[in-house]
Image: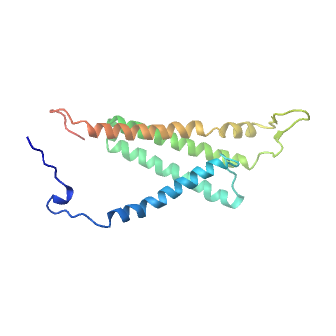
Amino acid sequence: MVRSTIKFSDLPGTTVCPTLPAIRGFFLAPLFFTILLLLLGCLQPNNALAFQPHAYSGLYIHQLAHFFLIVSLFFFAVKARQAHLASLRGWQHIIAGTWLLMLWSATTMVGHFLDLHINEDALFLPPGADIPLLRLYSWQEALYYILKLDHLIAVPAMFLFYRGLKLLREEQATPPSPGQARP
């Protein structure tokens, strides 16, 4: 038995582009350069500020962005439920991640507002101590430092998005059973 191989260029209506390697190199070169810069940046770390303070005037714009994120995610979750997408397991995860991301944005908004009322001398280093101590004067300061743990909401939200997309891909890859119609 003789097997013949068919090249892509042998198929009707297809031509091989002679400049394809040049085009591929044109798009891959910036990607490799960016990865190289990121790796070099990891070798020279500096301060990594997770909860970044904003200038007073920039705070209003930033808060508006959080508000619009909450509103848009709310409408997304409602529309997904109205379209009966919540019957699929993947979409259930995505909708749950949407609600968590709304909660994250709301808690971050409150944290930004509380940032305006925090004393700067809350962290201090007593004489002879190696570890700074936290002095809380009010419930707002305690709430502010609790809300700085916003990653405990954002990371599970991103995981739910990832899990939902993975489940949707797996659902598309499996053929439906004979009596089952796809939504």
The percent position of residue 150, horizontal first and vertical second, equals 61, 40
The percent position of residue 140, horizontal first and vertical second, equals 73, 40
For the N terminus, the quadrant is top left
For the C terminus, the quadrant is top left
The reply to whether residue 87 is in sight is: yes
Residue nearest the viewer, comparing 87 with 129: 129
121 vs 105, left or right, is: right
Residue under the point 81% across and 46% down: 120
Residue nearest the viewer, comparing 146 with 64: 146
Residue under the point 21% across and 35% down: 176
The percent position of residue 131, horizontal first and vertical second, equals 81, 34
Residue under the point 16% across and 50% down: 5
Please count the marks in the image: 0
Vertical placement of residue 80 versus 14, above or below: above
Q: Residue furthest right?
A: 127
21 vs 35, left or right, is: left
Which quadrant holds residue 181?
Answer: top left
Residue nearest the viewer, comparing 67 with 180: 180
